Image (tube, rainbow, N blue to C red):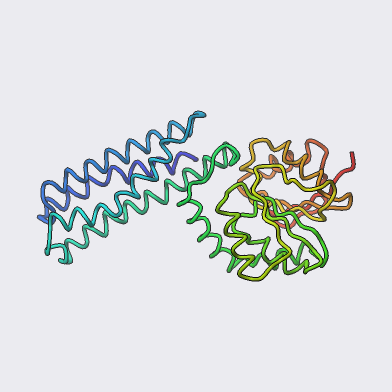
């Protein structure tokens, strides 16, 4: 159920005043602490409900932005407020416990808000919604950790990348595949790393400079690659199709830049396999020729 994240967000918001009341009854916070918890609860619950309404209709994601902003403000305001009202008592273990629980609620809400925004992007397409900077930074951390276990280099070797090839990594993100692919194809090859998010492009370019990679070109775009016809051997479309609103236009562009013997490798993450396959083959631009788990290989059809 897609609304679960919103409901959990609202539930965590309702816990703010509850926690304050419990600690007030145990003489661990002052009466004004209940007021602070009530304000935090009302604001975050309101933002969660607003975001949920936006999720159900094509509205501007104001509620989603505010849902991320509110807990982000609560995180630093909580210790500041407690220091002002408690002074030296702030160092007591009981008081620190109050702080830790309140901070944990805010952090959990912030993470949920980012996931809510990410889900909205998946549904509406990232060409219409840009992932907020905090969300991108969290995604960067998650992907960096995931890369340690998934080994993108292994995947690239399995699909048969070779020296001298030209590769388009569409939706390159932090360069999980683009960076190691540049090493595999060598100086005679070329990697085109495309993404809609400016931060993704900066991360990839910085990593390329750090590793002294000269055969990588980053492209900031929502769809058009700006590349010549039939210039790339392989297209990587990993965990990105669900974010594209105009999928037909995207497939036409990928078909245009692929060489006649070229292949497209795509993953069906966040999409039902049937819907995924229908999307990629319905226009008769690509034909499925292989599958390994959630990784599918398509051949370019001649039209």
Residue 282 position in % (x across, y down): 78, 36
Q: Is residue 92 above or below residue 19?
A: below
Q: Report whether 167 appears left or right of 197.
A: right
Residue at screen point 50% across, 61% down: 141
| Residue 147 occupies quadrant | bottom right
| Residue 241 occupies quadrant | top right
Instruction: Say which of 51 and 188 sits in front.
Output: 188
Q: Is residue 54 above or below residue 119?
A: above
Q: Report whether 200 appears left or right of 179.
A: left
Residue 161 position in % (x across, y down): 79, 64
Q: Is residue 167 above or below residue 34?
A: below
Residue at screen point 45% across, 52% down: 134
> How many numbered markers are drawn?
0
Q: Report whether 244 appears left or right of 86.
A: right
| Residue 218 occupies quadrant | bottom right
Instruction: Say which of 4 and 221 sits in front.
Output: 221
Residue 224 position in % (x across, y down): 71, 42
Image quadrant holding the C terminus, namely top right
Q: Report whether 300 appears left or right of 220.
A: right
Instruction: Say which of 90 and 55 sits in front.
Output: 90
């Amino acid at each position: 159920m897609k609304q679960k994240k919103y409901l959990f967000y609202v539930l965590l918001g309702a816990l703010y005043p509850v926690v304050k009341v419990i600690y007030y009854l145990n003489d661990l916070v002052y009466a004004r602490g209940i007021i602070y918890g009530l304000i935090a609860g009302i604001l975050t619950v309101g933002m969660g409900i607003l975001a949920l309404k936006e999720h159900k209709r094509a509205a501007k994601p104001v509620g989603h932005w505010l849902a991320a902003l509110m807990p982000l403000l609560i995180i630093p305001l909580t210790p500041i407020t407690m220091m002002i009202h408690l002074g030296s008592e702030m160092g007591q273990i009981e008081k620190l416990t109050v702080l830790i629980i309140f901070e944990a609620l805010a952090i959990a809400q912030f993470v949920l808000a980012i996931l809510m925004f990410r889900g909205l992007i998946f549904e509406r397409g990232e060409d219409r919604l840009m992932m907020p900077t905090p969300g991108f930074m969290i995604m960067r951390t998650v992907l960096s950790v995931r890369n340690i276990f998934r080994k993108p280099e292994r995947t690239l070797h399995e699909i048969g990348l070779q020296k001298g090839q030209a590769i388009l990594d569409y939706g390159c993100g932090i360069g999980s595949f683009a960076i190691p692919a540049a090493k595999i194809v060598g100086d005679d090859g070329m990697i085109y790393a495309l993404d809609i998010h400016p931060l993704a492009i900066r991360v990839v370019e910085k990593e390329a400079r750090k590793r002294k990679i000269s055969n990588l070109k980053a492209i900031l775009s929502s769809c058009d690659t700006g590349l010549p016809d039939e210039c790339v051997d392989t297209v990587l479309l990993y965990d990105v199709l669900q974010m594209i609103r105009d999928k037909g236009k995207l497939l036409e562009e990928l078909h245009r830049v692929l060489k006649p013997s070229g292949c497209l490798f795509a993953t069906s993450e966040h999409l039902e396999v049937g819907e995924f396959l229908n999307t990629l083959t319905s226009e008769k631009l690509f034909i499925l020729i292989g599958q390994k788990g959630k990784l599918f290989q398509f051949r370019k059809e001649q039209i």
